[in-house]
Every structure is written in structure tokens, then in C-alpha cells.
């Protein structure tokens, strides 16, 4: 608290000025006279002192104006100096000197301020990540891609848009059973909102991947990725113990190459009777795979060798495709392994004959007559193969033969197939077929005691023993330019077999 005495001293007080009263200078005798009237008491008049409180604010204001003027002058001085320095710099060689455009001082300053950068995208929060759900689905027997998406509780419109975007890139109705489908779903924040399909990835084949992605506006776009395919060569060898198929699988021969090897040797080897324990096999396989390690195809057989009868005989084949011909196997001398006719028109591991060619007592008619073919008992529905290339002459019902197909192979040879349960689709008179093509299925139509195939071979219109003719049927041989090209293939395969 401020002292009252100090406060009184700090406030300027008025200076008293005495004014003498009238008659103060008269003599005493006159003042003692009775006629003298005493004057009144002297009056004190106070004259106020001039105040100085306004001087301080005025001084501060003056100093502020001076400071602003100094700042303005300095800024103008710096701009003049900068302009002087720039004007002294030599212009670039390709530039034409032009007078600088006049601009406002504040605009020049504004241009020196760097433009703000774009704001970074917002970070995904933990809540957004929790709403995403990834899963791998597999197509079961009878499933479709539409039914698979329906089971995910997606809206019908969402499913329709997704399938519409996929159709140009994917055969939706031909997906294999067990096909994996990778999906990412977004669960809604609100309980009543539907789920959203964020992306879907499917690999219909090893070398191609299809990815469906959803944009923010709800539309879908599809991207395809094609994987690079690499080729490797493997040699597989082994010894037969139980059977050729089991031993080859244990040795690591791919199933595609194994099937090729069986077809290549089937014209010369009876796998049921000719093979013995201890016989050997070896093969050179071309296996393709993608850059991420997925196998492409079932393995392609390039060369194979098989010994039979405990090593008494051996057979070797090379893969080759002649100009305009089929890709199949040839002996080292350029002779095709394919005979003009198959020994048996059924693809069975175990094949028996219930009735041979020649005279016999008919099991239904009860009398003896010529049996013009060979009967092979087989389960109903077993595929029946064309014995050779040719043209279909007859296809339909034929009396006691039941469902019947006749194929003409040349001007001399023709084959017949009887008692079929049904004829294969597309087999009709005039249609050309190739060897081993399915033309029908085993049945028991016509005069038959059970499901079997009656197989006939006709030479110049007369029946002959089909097994004897098929065994002696000729093979085609390469010649000229085709033989020279085949020898180059043989040399290359031999180099790969030796590890070159």
C-alpha cells in the first residue's frame, strides 16, 4: 500500500500568494484612530501548476513511428540491393533479356513463400484393419463361384458386379473342383450394413493369375498376371518290383510322362505277361514350372527305355512330331511305334478273351457256327477305342450285333465293334476318326449273354483273325528331310541324357 504522506508529496500543491490588504501601509496613529476601520483579513489565492502527464505517451508514440519508418526504409534498401545484384548477373545464353514485369511488393514476398505440400493419405487405423477378413475358399463338388460368394453374406448386386467383371477374364463355369479362391472381406462398422468384397484372387492355371479389386466408388476392376514358364529336364530310372506303374511312380516319374510311356510301349509289350521282376526302365522328362515354383503340365516324356523278359529284350523310343503329323514316339531308326491297328481296342490293364476267332457253339442259339471275331469281357461302360485311323461306315443298330460301329481303314481293311451300350457322341457315318479315339462303350445289346466287346476285322469284306493281323501290321518309317530332322532330335536328346 502507498503511504498517504508520500502520496500527498507526490501531488503538486498550489503555491500560496499573499496579497496585502488595503491600508496595510498606513501609520499606526491612523490605525489607532477611532474613525479608522480595520480592513478585512488577507485573502489567499491559489494558482494551479501546469500538468506534465501527457508527455510520456506522446514520446512513446513518436518513438514507435520512428521505428516503423526505420523498418520500412531497411526493407526497401534490401530490395534495392537485391535488384542491383540480380541486374549485374549475365543472362543465360539461350534467354532473350526481357524487362522484369512490374509487380506489387507484397506479391513478390508471397511468391517467396513455398507452396504447401499435399497432405499425406490418412493412416489406416487399427479399427479399419480389424474390419478386414482374409480367407481361402475351395470349390466343392456342385459349387459355383456365385454360390461360393453367396455363402459369404454378400449382397446380390455386389456379387453380380463382381461376376460381370470376371467373365471376360475367367471361364467361371469351368473351374475345377478344389480350386482355391482367396478373398478379402470388409465387415461393416454398423451391424445392419452388408459386408463388402474388397478383393478376390484366383489362379485358374499355373501360369496365369486373375485378381479382382474393388474401387472406392463400388466398381470392380480385374488385373491379370502372367508368370514366366521355365523348363527343366530330369532323368528317372528304376527297377520293376511289383508292376511297372507302381515302380515308376515310386521312382518319381510324373503321371503324364508315365501315361506316355505306357502308350509308347503298348504296341510291342504286354505289361501283364512280358514284364518280370528285375526288369529296368529309364526315362528323360521335360518338366515346366512357373517362376514361383508351380508345375505346368504333367510332364512330357522325351525318351524312354524298357527291358523285358529279365533283360532278354529292350525297347527304346524318342518323341518326334513329323511335319503335318501327330506328336508321338519312334524307334531310334525312325520307325513309328504305332502299328496300323491296335491289338486290342480296349484300354485295360488286364484283358482276357472269352471267345476266340473260329468255329464255336453259340451260347444262346445252341448250334455251332463261325465266330467272326474275338470277344473281350469288360465292365459295362468301358471306353471302346478305334483300332486305327479311318472313316466311320456304319453307326447304329445292327440286328444281333446290337449297337454297332464299322470303320473302314483302307481299301482292304475294316473293323467292327458290337454289343455297345451306346455310341460315343459325334460318331456317325462319314466321320473320320483317329487311332485310340473313343467310339463307344461296352454293353450287352443284341444277342449277348453279358457285357463284352465283340471285335471283328475284315479283309476285302471277309472276316479274319484280328489278333494275328494286328500283330503283323506294318509301321510307317521316316524318310528324306523328316528322317534328317529326326536324327537331330535324337542327338539333342542323347546330349541331355548324358548331362550335356
Image (spheres, grey):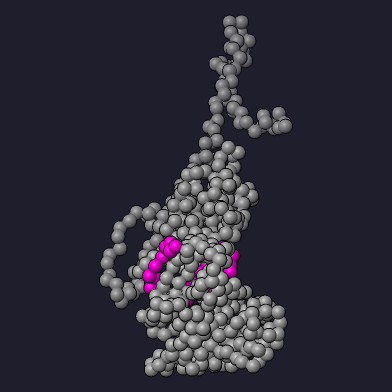
Report whether 314 appears left or right of 408.
right
Hey, which quadrant is residue 18 in on the image?
top right
How many numbered marks are there? 0
The residue stretch that appears in magenta: 374-399
Q: Quadrant of the N terminus?
A: top right
Can residue 185 be spotted in the picture?
A: yes
As for residue 70 lying within the magenta part, the answer is no
Q: In which quarter of the image is the C terminus?
A: bottom right
> In this view of the protein, which residue sits in the foreground, 159 or 440?
440
Can residue 297 be spotted in the picture?
A: no
Q: In the figure, 281 relative to 16: above or below?
A: below
Q: In the figure, 89 relative to 126: above or below?
A: below
> In this view of the protein, which residue sits in the foreground, 294 or 44?
294
Measured as percent of width and height from the top left, residue 123 is found at: 58, 53
> In this view of the protein, which residue sits in the foreground, 316 or 197?
316
Q: In the figure, 277 relative to 198: above or below?
A: below
> In this view of the protein, which residue sits in the foreground, 474 or 142?
474
Measured as percent of width and height from the top left, residue 127 is found at: 63, 48
As for residue 383 lying within the magenta part, the answer is yes
Measured as percent of width and height from the top left, residue 134 is found at: 61, 54
Report whether 54 appears left or right of 80.
right
Point 60% across, 82% down: residue: 270
Point 57% across, 59% down: residue: 177
Measured as percent of width and height from the top left, residue 454 is found at: 51, 70
Amino acid at each position: 500500500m502507498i503511504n498517504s504522506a508520500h502520496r500527498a508529496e507526490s501531488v503538486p500543491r498550489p503555491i500560496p500568494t499573499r496579497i496585502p490588504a488595503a491600508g496595510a501601509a498606513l501609520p499606526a496613529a491612523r490605525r489607532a484612530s477611532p474613525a479608522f476601520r480595520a480592513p478585512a483579513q488577507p485573502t489567499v489565492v491559489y494558482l494551479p501548476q501546469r500538468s506534465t502527464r501527457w508527455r510520456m505517451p506522446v514520446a512513446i508514440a513518436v518513438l514507435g513511428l520512428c521505428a516503423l519508418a526505420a523498418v520500412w526504409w531497411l526493407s526497401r534498401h534490401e530490395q534495392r540491393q537485391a535488384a542491383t545484384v540480380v541486374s549485374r548477373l549475365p543472362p543465360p545464353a539461350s534467354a532473350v533479356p526481357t524487362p522484369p514485369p512490374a509487380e506489387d511488393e507484397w506479391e513478390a514476398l508471397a511468391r517467396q513463400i513455398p507452396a504447401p505440400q499435399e497432405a499425406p493419405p490418412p493412416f489406416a487405423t487399427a479399427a479399419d484393419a480389424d474390419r478386414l477378413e482374409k480367407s481361402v475358399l475351395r470349390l466343392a463338388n456342385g459349387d459355383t463361384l456365385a454360390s461360393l460368394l453367396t455363402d459369404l453374406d454378400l449382397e446380390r448386386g455386389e456379387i453380380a458386379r463382381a461376376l460381370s467383371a470376371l467373365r471376360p477374364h475367367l471361364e467361371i463355369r469351368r473351374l475345377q473342383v478344389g480350386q482355391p479362391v482367396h478373398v478379402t472381406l470388409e465387415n461393416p462398422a454398423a451391424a445392419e450394413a452388408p459386408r463388402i468384397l474388397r478383393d478376390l484372387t484366383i489362379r485358374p492355371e499355373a501360369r496365369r493369375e486373375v485378381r479382382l479389386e474393388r474401387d472406392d466408388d463400388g466398381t470392380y476392376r480385374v488385373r491379370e498376371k502372367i508368370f514366366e514358364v521355365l523348363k527343366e529336364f530330369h532323368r528317372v530310372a528304376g527297377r520293376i518290383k511289383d508292376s511297372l506303374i507302381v515302380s515308376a511312380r515310386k521312382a518319381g516319374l510324373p503321371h503324364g510322362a508315365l501315361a506316355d510311356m505306357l502308350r509308347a510301349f503298348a504296341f510291342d509289350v504286354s505289361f501283364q505277361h512280358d514284364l518280370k521282376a528285375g526288369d529296368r526302365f529309364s526315362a528323360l522328362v521335360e518338366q515346366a514350372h512357373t517362376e514361383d515354383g508351380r508345375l505346368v503340365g504333367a510332364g512330357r516324356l522325351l525318351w524312354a527305355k524298357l527291358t523285358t523278359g529279365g533283360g532278354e529284350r529292350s525297347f527304346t523310343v524318342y518323341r518326334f512330331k513329323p511335319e503335318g503329323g501327330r506328336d508321338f514316339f519312334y524307334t531310334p531308326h525312325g520307325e513309328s511305334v504305332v502299328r496300323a491297328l491296335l491289338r486290342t481296342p480296349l484300354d485295360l490293364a488286364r484283358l482276357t478273351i472269352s471267345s476266340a476267332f473260329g468255329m464255336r457253339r453259340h451260347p444262346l442259339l445252341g448250334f455251332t457256327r463261325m465266330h467272326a471275331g474275338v470277344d473281350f469281357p469288360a465292365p459295362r461302360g468301358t471306353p471302346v477305342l478305334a483300332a486305327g485311323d479311318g472313316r466311320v461306315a456304319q453307326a447304329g443298330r445292327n440286328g444281333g450285333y446290337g449297337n454297332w460301329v464299322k470303320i473302314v481303314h483302307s481299301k482292304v481293311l475294316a473293323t467292327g465293334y458290337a454289343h455297345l451300350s451306346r455310341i460315343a457322341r459325334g460318331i456317325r457315318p462319314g466321320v473320320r476318326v483317329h487311332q485310340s479315339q473313343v467310339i463307344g462303350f461296352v454293353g450287352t445289346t443284341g444277342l449277348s449273354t453279358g457285357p463284352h466287346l465283340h471285335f471283328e476285322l475284315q479283309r476285302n469284306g471277309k472276316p479274319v483273325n484280328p489278333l494275328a493281323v494286328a500283330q503283323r501290321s506294318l509301321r510307317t518309317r521316316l524318310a528324306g528331310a523328316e528322317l534328317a530332322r529326326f536324327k537331330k532330335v535324337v542327338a539333342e536328346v542323347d546330349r541331355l541324357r548324358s548331362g550335356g
